[in-house]
Amino acid sequence: MSRGPMPDAGYFDKWHADMATSPVRDAVIARTLELPAELRDAGTLNRQGVDELTGELRLPPDGLLLDIACGRGGYGIEVARRTGARLIGVDFSAVAVQQARSNGAHRLPAGRSDFRVGTLLATGLPSGSADALMCVDAVQFGDPPLAALREFRRLLAPGGRLAVTCWEATDPADDRVPARIQAVNLLRDLPEAGFTDVRVHDRPQWRRAELAMWEAALAETGTDPALLSLQAEGRRSLDTANAMRRVLATATAP
């Protein structure tokens, strides 16, 4: 299967800019995923997923949390709010980073968050600096994902915790699955990247919530670009509903 081109920063700049003027899109996601409206994120991780991810990170008091491929920052900001962690978010979309800074300023105490432009493979952050690292639904954009996991390992201090959410192909030979998802094999790649205590959990209940979100999006009417983009993604996702499984991977930096 051809890997095809990865979306570039310009694609995601427009995507995030469109979302900033689409309250209907945010409302669909907040309602169906049972998330607070002020979270204002672009992902498909539901409330249960945020709860579990927060617990798995095991952040110490005043620990440093990295949110890599943070988008508008909502998930990382929510985890930082719950745990009292300091937060650094990284995304390769400058528009997303700008929005994340605004969200962080509204939802976290002054000086507790910082958002920067960087990539999955080159974050620009110092080695061994983080107590925990999260990457929500984006490791597939690493080219290859193993390289992103190696960067995550570099960033974590000994004993630091990693939590990655993503999708994996139910059948690796299923050509309906996008090539970037076909490349994801977290049980194989996390040990190769240097992690221990590796666990990959299937989360079918997250998947059901995600599919319900797509169905709700398709029931909406409107012409704003963010809603239309959400609906187009929903059609693709519903067409491959049984071809991918939702996973949470956790690991520790030795």
Image (spheres, rainbow, N blue to C red):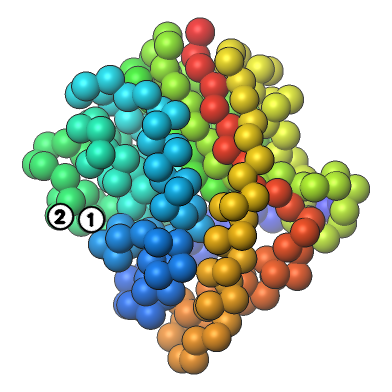
Q: Is residue 18 left or right of residue 100?
A: right
Judging from the image, what secondary structure is the residue with disc 1 in? helix
The residue that appears at 32% across and 24% down in the rendered structure is 59
**Residue 149 visible:** yes
Residue 244 location (% of width, % of height): 74, 52
Judging depth in this view, the residue of 40 and 242 nearest the camera is 242
Q: Which residue is mark 1?
A: 103
- Is the C-beta separation of discs 1 and 2 under 8 Å? yes
The residue that appears at 49% across and 14% down in the rendered structure is 253
Q: Amino acid at mark 1?
A: Asn
Q: Quadrant of residue 182?
A: top right
Residue 35 location (% of width, % of height): 36, 59
The CA span between labels 1 and 2 is: 5 Å
Residue 128 location (% of width, % of height): 39, 14
Q: Is residue 227 left or right of residue 66?
A: right
- Name the residue furthest right: 173
Judging from the image, what secondary structure is the residue with disc 2 in? helix
**Residue 97 visible:** no
Judging depth in this view, the residue of 162 and 90 nearest the camera is 162
Mark 2, other Cα within 10 Å: few <14 / some 14–19 / many ≥20 = few
Residue 243 location (% of width, % of height): 79, 56
Q: Which residue is mark 2?
A: 106
Mark 1, other Cα within 10 Å: few <14 / some 14–19 / many ≥20 = many
Residue 64 got which mark? none
Q: Amino acid at mark 2?
A: His
- Name the residue furthest left: 110
Q: Vertical placement of 86 versus 197: above or below? A: below
Judging depth in this view, the residue of 143 and 49 nearest the camera is 49
